Amino acid sequence: MKHVFIINPTAGKSDSRQKIYDMAEKLRQEHGLEVQCLLTKKQGHATEIARRLCQSGEELRFYACGGDGTVNEVANGIIGYDNAAMTVIPVGTGNDFLKNFGPEDMEKFRDAENLWDAPQFPIDAIDVNGRIALTIACSGLDARVAKDVHNFSESPILDGKSSYIVSLMVNFLFKGIGSHWTVELDGEAVEDDYALVAVCNGRYYGGGFMPVAEARMDDGVLNTLVVKKVSRLTFIKFVNPYSKGQYYKFPHLARCSTPKVIRIRSEKPDIVTCLDGECITSDDVTIQISDKRLNFFGPAGCSCNRTARKPLI
Ligand SMILES: Nc1ncnc2c1ncn2[C@@H]1O[C@H](COP(=O)(O)OP(=O)(O)OP(=O)(O)O)[C@@H](O)[C@H]1O
């Protein structure tokens, strides 16, 4: 078994490379493990590295050292390979993926000592036009906000959630709320003006926004929230409850369901879709549960559903 640390040197607000190298060395010295540290050089590189290593057939444990983008890239590289599993060492800005495990267990992920021999379990994944998202795939206003958020997250005075709020305000004030699309849920198509479509396997995005609090990451179900275009005034009233999973307070605007296939079409390539914060733009997006599950390992006793709310009746 080889332990591979894939490190994004640009993730987070400070350089975490030395901290990771020290953890890796400790695993070598104290447990006699075979450990490799690899730095990513550009966007998409973590997927390339992970996939290439998986193709060797060797038993591998990957540690995605970065933020949600790095986690997403490593997951895209290893999914479907039985010889590989992954975990996360959070050194990014937002680390929304690990929020699903709750604050106490999130702390345990910071130390590889809690991870190298940790139990493995499967997590569902979302397939978006052939690419994988683990937590949330969103299209519309929230995706445009996520696309722009990196411009603000470099600011030393803004944390993950503040960067998201600033990006939200800029999009809200200057770029408009709605898009004219056809949204199809399990073949039932409705052409209308939409604010957003959020397809949730897990619960958090945008530095802590939680659209569907009952989404569970291993139940084979995608909780999908479709929100119609609204006026700016209504939107202001909607944002806070939306961020706390209280979409049910706005039944005339937001519909939550569990379709197996979600398709969004537009006459122009204006559908921005974010997969765990990584964005694609197209005129036709198909989102569904992936037929492959992700091999994940985490500290003993952890649960990816720790913070999930009981299903609403
Ligand atoms: N060497 C590199 N140079 C520039 N960009 C890189 C490099 N390696 C990875 N990236 C890209 O950096 C982006 C941000 O990484 P990541 O999301 O892991 O960190 P973050 O933005 O600090 O955290 P979070 O998304 O949780 O807020 C990703 O899109 C990733 O592809």
Image: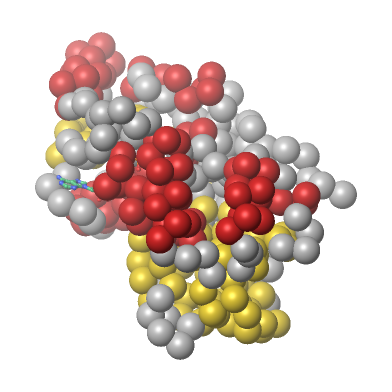
The image shows residue 168, relative to residue 27, as above or below, that is below
Q: Is residue 134 left or right of residue 311?
A: left
- For the point 58% across and 24% down, the residue is 301
Residue 71 screen position, x and y as percent: 36, 44
Residue at image coords 26%, 35%: 155
Name the image colouring.
secondary structure
Q: Is residue 29 left or right of residue 242?
A: left
- Measuring from the top left, give residue 286's x and y in whole percent: 51, 75
- Left or right of 175? Residue 305 is right
Which residue is drawn at the image coordinates 64% and 68% (left, top)? Answer: 228
Location of residue 100 in the rendering, given as x and y in whole percent from the top left corner:
55, 36
Q: Is residue 91 visible?
A: no
Which residue is at a point 45% across and 49% down the rendered structure image? 169
Q: Quadrant of residue 311?
A: top right
Q: Nearer the viewer, residue 34 or 206?
A: 206
In this rendering, the count of numbered labels is 0
Q: Nearer the viewer, residue 308 or 152?
A: 152
Front residue of 194/307: it is: 194
Q: Quadrant of residue 27?
A: top left
Residue 141 in view (yes/no): yes
